[in-house]
Image (cartoon, rainbow, N blue to C red):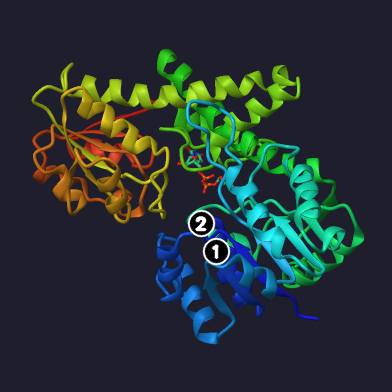
Amino acid sequence: MSYRLTVLGTGYLGATHAACMAALGFEVLGLDVDPAKVARLQAGELPIHEPGLEELLQRGLESGRLRFTTSYEEAAEFGDVHFVCVGTPQKKGEYAADVSYLDAVVESLAPYLTRECLVIGKSTVPVGTAQRLADKLTRLAPAGDQVELAWNPEFLREGFAVRDTMHPDRIVLGVVSDKAEKVMREVYESMLAEGTPLIITDYPTAELVKVAANAFLATKISFINAMAEVCEAAHADVKDLSLALSFDERIGGRFLNPGLGFGGGCLPKDIRAFMARAGELGADQALTFLREVDAINMRRRARMVDLARELAGGSFRGCTVGVLGAAFKPNSDDIRDSPALDVAVKIREQGGKVTVYDPVALGNARKAHPTLGFGSSALDAARGAHVVLLLTEWQEFIDLDPERLGDVVAARKIVDGRNALDAETWRASGWHYRALGRP
Ligand code: UDX
């Protein structure tokens, strides 16, 4: 049997999941409570920048297998399997995650569930949420315990969302019955056929796998950035250190790039929500190290500002700063908790004249920070700059010609916040090159 799928919530995760499931041949109905978003998606227009996704969306719409709606009644009627993909942002003024969107989905969908179906949670949640939502579902759904919940965390990276969805590293499934496993094996058949490992477990373990993975990645990044702090104090070179560590197969080189640290809609808020939840469970001591991971990460931004100020001659007053990068990482237009914008804003607050350029995130950056200056290209942002800062390692910045950039700036001074440039090449062109954690 080919199941009919719904995807509830069409943000980063949901839009990607819906388009990918349609590409796999399923009939898919995407739902969002935002009618403007639904209208754009239905018109084949992707509200976010994600390589390859818009084409997939358009192909899905053309095939007739993919549609979007705002109606929960329609979704309940349509779906055999409902994927829940709404966000769980950080609560204002607290570390904990706000799971109210998940509760809203369950409360809106359940009253229309009159037949057997499966609800699959994909959002990142505090451990214990799945059991609570499962109880709520069976309580509110007319079909009662014919409605079953499973938890299937998503590990996709922005910028690689389509690839990560179609060819995941692993599939984790928290279930309470064999039925959910059977259905999910059919839905993910193509991935399992490629040999993708499948881990079947209980709800709390499935929920924890996701936050544990993100906590590990954040820790790895902060580890190398802590080494960068020590390297600076000891006049050592963290880039060489990181390279040397990477050849130890037990350590590995990925997520070991020292620099401005992590941002985005996931890692920062996920480690904070994890600490908050551990506290509620009486296991806060187990995760106190994540406080340090967070602190190291935030210190990178402050250090970047200090280094820029040092190059500016001790003060930003009367100083023009060219900022390359606004997105929290390359190949994305996402500016949520972007280290680059955080640095740009701090420098502006300290009196610097800041001009930012980013290949795709300028629109979002301008909306969020209308008082910053914006350029139409890397050269434009750097024009007349006393200091240039590379804060997001887009390939086009790595490919910049130091001579051409050098012709437009007021002074050949650059801070490489991502350790992405070849220091020798830039120095050979007369640039004063500095990077975090390097002599
Ligand atoms: C992350 C997880 O990788 C993904 O599995 C999860 O589902 C969601 O959160 P994402 O937020 O898209 O994905 O970004 P990721 O590629 O993990 O990068 C996170 C941040 O870490 C970026 O700001 C990046 O610049 C930074 N980073 C990454 C480093 O500073 N150094 C590194 O070595 C790697």
Marks 1 & 2, CB-CB < 8 Å contact: yes
| Residue 16: numbered disc | 1
Task: Locate the N terminus by quadrant.
Answer: bottom right
* Residue pictured at 59% horizontal, 43% vertical: 100
Q: Label 1 is placed on what type of residue? A: Thr
| Residue 12: numbered disc | 2
Q: Label 2 is placed on what type of residue? A: Tyr
Say if residue 22 shows up in the picture. yes
Furthest toward the right, the residue is: 178
Is 85 left, or right, of 410 in this rendering? Answer: right
* Residue pictured at 73% horizontal, 37% vertical: 127
Q: Where is residue 132 in the image (x, y as percent from the top left)?
A: 76, 42
* Residue pictured at 71% horizontal, 59% vertical: 110
As displayed, is residue 247 above or below residue 224? below
As displayed, is residue 77 above or below residue 84? below
As displayed, is residue 321 above or below residue 359? above
Q: What element carries label 2?
A: helix
